[in-house]
Image: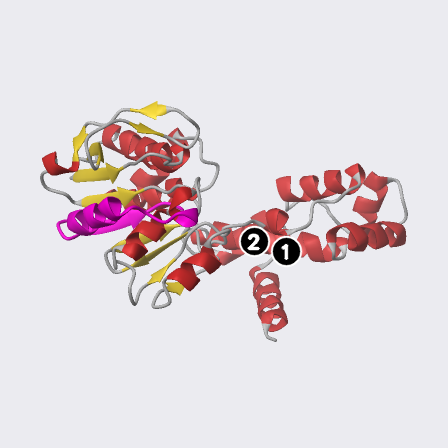
Amino acid sequence: MPLVMLVFDGVRLLDMTGPLEVFDVAASLGVPYRVTVCSVNGLDVITSSGLRVGVECAVAEIGSIDTLLVPGSQGLVTSGPTAPLVETVRSLASRARRVGSVCAGSFVLGAAGLLDGRTATTHWRYTAELARRFPTVTVDKEALYVRDGPVITSAGVAAGIDLALGLVEEDAGDEVAYEVARDLVVLMRRMGKQPQLSAAARTARPRRELIRMLCDEIVADPAANHSGPSLAARACMSVRHLSRLFKDEVGCTPAAFVTRVRLEAATALIMSGEIASTAAKRSGLGSDETLRRTLRRQQVQRIP
């Protein structure tokens, strides 16, 4: 199963190495991947971090292709991809069964016309620019990765690992993908429709160390006792005073933050294969009825 990764000067290192590690581990488990790293002219490339990376060959030497992957770089957004890179991707994609991009690599696919009329994603910083530059593309601003037909695009940097695990699952099944994730010490396989940014990352970082500590404890163990009195006791203050500080620092009550984190944890567990009742219990929501009620409430709150 020949898999080709096309690299270029300025490429972001983890955009490359994350997926490559996934495919290497999968190959060690028996998945018949044959990975080739190439550049347009066959010359080594310099990554955005300054590291020189050797390539195996020039594009002209590539034979059959099952999967083409294009990593990203900041320059693809600020300056745009070069004409030779775009033409090379267009040519290689015409021979591939499927084509994928990591992070800003979606800008190359867009320039090559591969995203026209499709749904795609990219790093959350660049979604608005991707939509502006390629108006025929429906940009999913939330998803970790999106598959639309033979084209797969992912969010930024580490999301390339999630995309690669998704491809392994497609090629060899869920159990193999799970074993690859375990080998790489990925704590939880994230599915494509999970949000790019977690509840904690979407929340303003509190200025007070005490509030930061409580937020970190909630995120680290959503199922623990995070009731108002319990949190207040750990903070050595009254429930009312803690609630006032939380609203000032985080923008919501402690209870609202706990619910947001628990719902996100439950959703991730369900998407990883857990049944609703187990996901509700493990995330701290209690029962599947509580989970459904919380989901309904969250959906109503999103309606303008």
Label 2, residues with CA under 10 Å away: few <14, some 14-19, many ≥20: some
Magenta-colored span? 77-103
The reply, left or right, for residue 155 in relation to residue 55 is right
Contact between marks 2 and 1 (CB within 8 A): the answer is yes
The answer to whether residue 97 of the structure is visible from this angle is no
Q: Report the front residue among 228 and 63.
A: 63
Indicate the amino acid at tag 2: Glu
Indicate the amino acid at tag 1: Arg
Give the answer, above or below, for where 72 lies relative to 127.
Answer: above
Q: How is the image coloured?
A: secondary structure
Q: Which mark is residue 214?
A: none
| Position of residue 181 measured from the top left corner of the image (x, y, whole percent) | 39, 36
Q: Report the front residue among 226 and 189.
A: 189
Give the answer, above or below, for where 249 lies relative to 183.
Answer: below
Residue that carries the numbered disc 1 in the rendered image: 260
The local secondary structure at tag 2 comes to helix
Residue that carries the numbered disc 2 in the rendered image: 264
The local secondary structure at tag 1 comes to helix
- Quadrant of residue 23 in the image? top left
